[in-house]
Image (cartoon, coloured by chain):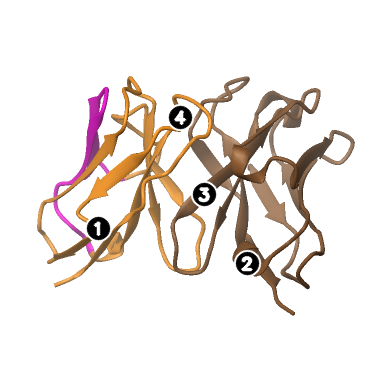
Chain colours: A orange, B brown
């Protein structure tokens, strides 16, 4: 199975900060990576697919990059509604594993 | 508009089974793969498997092989996930999630059900 690691696990930030989250895969997954945002008690919400494509309706302050084994999710200017947990997921091969998550909270 | 509406919360005793439904609307049911994932309280997300509603073929993660069954009913545009031999560690919120892209099993999940809490307790 492909393992995903995320760093950091927790991140404290302020409104307006630039935030970067890294996701690393245990083997190459080309660009078969998605990013999701999850708020407490809610289903995850798709932000980025195929590593760098912004999902329709998602604010442009979110961006994704990377390929192979290393990927990043960047929030260019953190907004109040962005405090949440972020997960990466690989869709290269079964099982479609998720990373352990990065919780972004207010400094 | 696309909607995935799941059945309500369930409580089961250890050793029992549970069947969660995910009723879909707003799109061509047989054109999009459906995935099931689960999330234990305070934990991350775990992929369980995938079903092709067009024909019913499935792939399950090895961890759940022999305990999980995913099925689809084209007459009601509903997918089901049944988990048997429940144990306390199975207490979780279960989600159905649609692959984004027509006929693509590797598409990311653009629509999700609201989640179904299954509690396993004696």
Distance from disc 3 to disc 4, alpha carbons, whole Å, reads 13 Å
Where in the figure is residue B101, as x and y percent of width and height? 55, 25
Q: Which residue is under mark 4?
A: A91
Give the residue displayed 25% in from the left and 23% down from the top: A67
Q: Which residues are magenta?
A: A59-79
Are callouts 4 and 2 both on one chain? no
CB under 8 Å between callouts 2 and 3? no
User: Compared to B13, does B105 lie above or below?
Assistant: above
- Chain letter for mark 2, please: B
* Chain identifier of the residue bearing label 4 in the image: A
Determine whether label 4 and label 2 are within 8 Å by CB: no
Separation of marks 2 and 1 at Cα, in angstroms: 24 Å
Q: Which residue is mark 1?
A: A9
- Find residue B46 and name its label: 3
Is B6 left or right of B36, judged from the image as shown? right
- Residue B91's disc is 2
Question: Callout 3: few (<14), some (14-19), or many (20+) C-alpha neighbours within 10 Å?
Answer: some
Q: CA distance from mark 3 to mark 1?
A: 17 Å
Dot 1: chain letter: A
Instruction: Categorize mark 2 by other alpha carbons within 10 Å: few (<14), some (14-19), many (20+).
Output: many
């Amino acid at each position: 199975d492909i393992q995903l690691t995320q760093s950091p696990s927790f991140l404290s930030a302020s409104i307006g900060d630039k935030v970067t989250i890294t996701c690393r895969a245990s083997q190459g997954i080309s660009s078969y990576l998605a990013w999701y945002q999850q708020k407490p008690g809610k289903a995850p919400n798709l932000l980025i697919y195929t590593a760098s494509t912004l999902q329709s309706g998602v604010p442009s302050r979110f961006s994704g990059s990377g390929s192979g084994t290393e990927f990043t999710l960047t929030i260019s200017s953190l907004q109040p509604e962005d405090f949440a947990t972020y997960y990466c997921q690989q869709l290269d091969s079964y099982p479609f594993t998720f990373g352990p998550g990065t919780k972004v909270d207010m400094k | 508009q696309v909607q995935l509406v799941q059945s309500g919360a369930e409580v089961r005793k250890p050793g029992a089974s549970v069947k969660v439904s995910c009723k879909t609307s707003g799109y061509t049911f047989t054109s999009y793969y459906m995935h099931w994932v689960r999330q234990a309280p305070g934990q991350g997300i775990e992929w369980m498997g995938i079903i092709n509603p067009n024909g019913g073929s499935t792939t399950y993660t090895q961890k759940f092989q022999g305990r999980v069954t995913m099925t689809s009913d084209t007459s009601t545009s509903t997918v089901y996930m049944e988990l048997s031999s429940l144990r306390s560690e199975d207490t979780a919120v279960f989600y159905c999630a649609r692959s984004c892209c027509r006929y693509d099993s590797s598409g990311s999940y653009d629509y999700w059900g609201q989640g179904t809490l299954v509690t396993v307790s004696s």
